Image: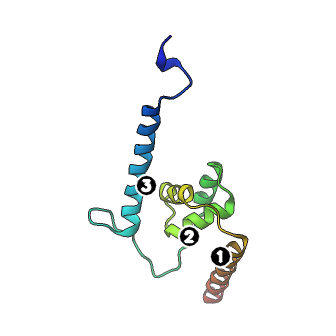
Amino acid sequence: ENPTSSRARSPLSELSDYNQRLARNLSSMSVLLGRPGARPIERSTEPFEPSESSIARLSEMGFTRDHAIEALESTGTNRVEIAMEYALTHPPSSPATRERRRAAREERRLQRERLIS
């Protein structure tokens, strides 16, 4: 029987996949932490707001809307790959933390509306 046609994955194959995921995580962390050789994260004077398209893409991957928003806000970017890595390595927040984040988003929205008016 051909071992490559088997549905069971070998420990070596699983280790290889794990190493690839780890390398991607470390690369993303380097970018987030501003390590030498990493691309700098652009900072804006405006508060970060997650885009609906990034939220939708993360939701399509199976993350809840709250978890997607948390990942985007925590990383400060709408780059789905970075937010996905964050979401995979950080469990969803507690209800109290989610509520604090919602209140902060609402306050930012109200401030923007006041500036526009």
User: Residue 47 got which mark?
Assistant: none
Foreground label between 2 and 3: 3
Secondary-structure class at tag 1:
helix
Residue 116's image quarter?
A: bottom right
Q: On the image, numbered disc 1 is attached to which residue? A: 101
**Which residue corresponds to the image point at 48% horizontal and 18% vertical from the top-left?**
3
Disc 3 to disc 1, how far (Cα)? Answer: 25 Å
**Which residue corresponds to the image point at 57% horizontal and 64% vertical from the top-left?**
71
Q: On the image, numbered disc 2 is attached to which residue? A: 73
**Which residue corresponds to the image point at 68% horizontal and 60% vertical from the top-left?**
65
Where 21 falls versus 35 (above or below)? above
**Residue 53, x across and y down, in percent:** 60, 58
Q: On the image, numbered disc 3 is attached to which residue? A: 25
Mark 2 vs 1, N-terminal side: 2
Disc 2 to disc 3, how far (Cα)? Answer: 18 Å
Disc 1: CA contacts within 10 A as few (<14), some (14-19) or many (>=20): some
- Pointers 2 and 3 in contact (C-beta within 8 Å): no
Mark 2 vs 3, N-terminal side: 3
- Pointers 2 and 1 in contact (C-beta within 8 Å): yes
Residue 107 visible to the viewer: yes
**Residue 6, x across and y down, in percent:** 54, 20
Amino acid on which disc 2 is placed: Glu
